[in-house]
Amino acid sequence: MKQFKILLLIAAMLPVLSSCNYNSLVEQKQGVEQQWAEVQNQYQRRADLIPNLVNTVKGYATHESSTFEKVTQARAAATAININADDLSEESLERFQAAQNQLTGALKSLLAVSEAYPELKANENFRDLQVQLEGTENRIATARGRYTQAVAGYNTAIKKFPTVIYAGWFGFSPQPQFKADEGAQRAPEVNF
């Protein structure tokens, strides 16, 4: 009889304890989704700037068409991959990151073209776009950092006791993190 009362007391307390943690998990999950939306927003900002940058450079470097094609194709590939926060997985995040990395590489090639055209580097429109693009890259890094922090907090919360017992019951599963690119730990080589 005494054991039955203890089990009944635990059963009565479980909803109270779980609802408190449940609400916290909902808030943290919403935080992850909000930070993911900000990551996508910054990548979209970059994608919106690219056509202006390409057109400005095209005016000076008409024979660099392969570079422009690569940037245009990479932008199209990067903007074609849209991941809803509810569909985040390791695989979808890897595809998204690969497309964004391809675009980053193409942009580096485009900006390298400017080195061959001193009059382009002096062009006010090009400089403004380059500054905006640089600022966008910084915003992307900040948004990714905030997303990573939100995911770390959320993933930790769903693995803590007693939450780990019932987090899966309510559909709370770990969210994927960004991973460093292959060779990111090596500094780029600069040759003059």
Image (cartoon, grey):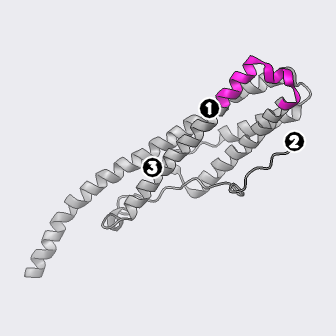
Q: Looking at the rendering, which quadrant does residue 165 occupy?
A: bottom left
Please rate how many residues cluster around mark 1, counting C-alpha atoms within 10 Å: few if below 14, some from 14 to 19, many from 20. few
- Which secondary structure is most common in the magenta stretch? helix
- Residue 14, placed above or below residue 19: below
Q: Are marks 3 and 1 in contact (CB under 8 Å)?
A: no
Q: Looking at the rendering, which quadrant does residue 79 occupy?
A: top right
Q: Are marks 1 and 2 in contact (CB under 8 Å)?
A: no
Residue 14 x %, y %: 21, 64
Residue 11 is inside the magenta segment: no
Residue 91 x %, y %: 61, 56
Q: Which of 76 and 104 is in front in this view?
A: 104
Please provide the residue range marked out in magenta. 115-133
Say whether disc 3 or disc 1 marks the residue closer to the N-terminus. 1
Q: Mark 1 points at which residue?
A: 135
Q: Name the residue under label 3.
A: 150
Tell me, for residue 192, which label it has, or none. 2
Indicate the secondary structure of the residue bearing disc 3: helix
Label 2 is placed on what type of residue? Phe
In front of the other: label 3 or label 1?
A: 1
- Residue 130, placed above or below residue 9: above
Q: Quadrant of the N terminus?
A: bottom left
